[in-house]
Image (cartoon, rainbow, N blue to C red):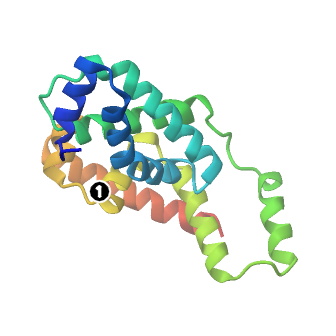
Amino acid sequence: MKKFADEELVLLFMTTRENKHFTKLYQRYYHKILKRCLYYAAGNYSEAEDLTHNIFIRMLEKLGTFRHEARFSTWLMSITANYCLDHFRAKRKQIVTPQDLLPMAEYISNGDTDAADFINYRLQLAISRLEDMERTLLLQKYQEGQSIRLLATQYDLTESAVKMRLKRAKERLRYSYLQVA
């Protein structure tokens, strides 16, 4: 099969409804979407796989709304971020109580962990306490390497506003991480 650009594959799929075009998009983006979902799901692989599957279903449902004004990858990552945010907003966890920490305390007391596991646990807990937008901006900037300009365009903000939101999100993350001790 000829190597088509993403936008060409979308057009081919929309006109022919041949699964091979969708399959190619799926193969190109499965791991990228899974990686982002893993972040939102705080490392829960099973939940991230479910989210990824649902995002591809959502993509199929919304494919007719793709207007070719942005790159397909930007459009798909926007669907991914919005789907994950909606999912976890609906599933929003309550404030962490001491009872929530008991499984981790038992895990540590059994000697089944090391310092890196505990640090990772503290970091994931601190990340989960951030607002959805803060978590999303940090993910897109520092894990995915998106530019300030792209983030500003994506969220209809000025570059200065994106920088300030990132600064505040990092401060809140640092404060939350230190409080988890």
Q: Quarter of the image containing the C terminus?
A: bottom right
Apparent side of residue 164 relative to residue 93 in the rendered image (left or right): left
**58 w.r.t. 109: above or below:** above
Residue 22, image x, y percentages: 35, 33
**70 w.r.t. 62: above or below:** below
| Residue at 56% over, 46% down | 48
Whether residue 171 appears in this view of the structure is yes
Q: Amino acid at mark 1?
A: Lys
Residue 168, image x, y percentages: 34, 54
Name the residue nearer the viewer: 15 or 122. 15
Residue 146, image x, y percentages: 23, 55
**89 w.r.t. 108: above or below:** above
Q: Quarter of the image containing the N terminus?
A: top left
Q: For the residue labelled by badge 1, is the local secondary structure a helix, a strand or a loop?
A: helix
| Residue at 52% over, 55% down | 127
| Residue at 56% over, 68% down | 178
